[in-house]
Image (cartoon, helix red, strand yellow):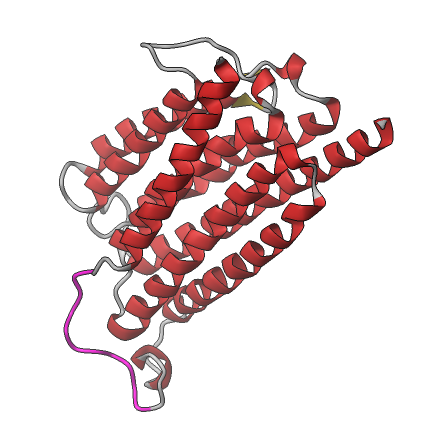
Amino acid sequence: MLNQRFSKTTSLLLVATFALALASTVSAVEVEEISKIGEDGLPSFLSDGVDDGMQSLTFFLFFIGYISMGAAFVFFMSERGNVAPQYRTTMTISALIVGIAAFHYYYMRGVYAEYEVVSIEYRYMDWIITVPLMALKFPSLIGKGAITDKKVAGLGFTGICFTGALIMIGFGYAGEAGLMHGLAALIIGGAGWAMIIVATGTPWTSGLGVDNSKIAPELLWSANALRWFIVVGWVIYPLGYLFSPEVDLLDGNQEAMAVAYNIADIINKIGFGVVAWMGAKKATEALAASE
């Protein structure tokens, strides 16, 4: 019964993800009407020699972001057929995460190149889709048998992760959009992050929704690596948030914010997929050896 519910939930979430991805790619961002592209086709800060270094770094990290995410998408989809059937959903989710991110990075790079504006709208469109998918990758990799039936306030593993993701991303956007005090938004958003950690566990402990003893030995390393990304890798995001011009908890600097976010995305989204792929390959090899 639990397996059937999980399969139905996964299917619905994947369908919803495709719908959100299509909707987000046609959304517009409010920016200046005057383009800042020079006659040579380069952003003005590159062609006019007025760059302070951070602008070039920001521009090229957007470029590297969508190229690397796109390459990762191709890799994960090509490897999907090289793992056992029960791990193909994991590869599909990995590909979705980086594929959706590649689209958004393409648009964020375009907005920055033309208007010298770091778009938080496209950034949060990406995160509201991809962060829940990153949490969903856990049960798809370790198996439904390792997911406990423990609940908090009526929410099981999936419910806790998705609610935590919505809180984290929703309040992060509220702070960066100036809808509420930046520090308060950071603290409340951090509570959503804590919810995900409680559900998935840490590299040293089982989570509320995960039983380590039921994870196959060849998958335990990958499961703990995913936890490292959530517990440590995600720390880069609040560091970038501190530089948000609207939040202004440090010196408001959109380039410093973008650099931190871009580095965090490249590390976490691609790295998340790579360690899941490594676990799926090991598990596939173990299954083949036992036959």
Query: Secondary structure of the magenta portion, mostly?
Result: loop
Residue 26 lies in quadrant: bottom left
Q: Position of residue 89 (x, y in %)?
A: 56, 38
Question: Residue 36 in the image: x percent, y percent?
Answer: 24, 79
In the rendering, at what x and y percent does residue 45 appear?
32, 78
Q: Image point 79% across, 36% down: which residue?
A: 285
- 238 lies above or below 164: below
**Left or right: 189 in relation to 139:** left
Question: Which region is colored magenta?
Answer: 29-39
> How many labels were placed on the picture?
0
Residue 137 vs 29, above or below: the answer is: above
Q: Is residue 236 above or below residue 1?
A: below
Q: Is residue 33 magenta?
A: yes
Closer-to-camera residue (61/85): 85
* Relative depth, front residue between 72 and 89: 89
In the image, what residue occupies the spot 25% across and 36% down?
Answer: 170
In the shown orientation, is residue 264 left or right of residue 142? left
Residue 228 left/right relative to 99: right
Residue 74 is one of the magenta-drawn residues: no
Question: In percent of the image, x 65 and y 15: which residue is there?
Answer: 214
Q: Quadrant of the C terminus?
A: top right
Does residue 252 appear in this view? Answer: no
Query: Residue 176: which quarter of the image?
Result: top left
Residue 128 at x, y = what percent?
A: 33, 41
Q: Is residue 278 at least partly visible in the picture? A: yes
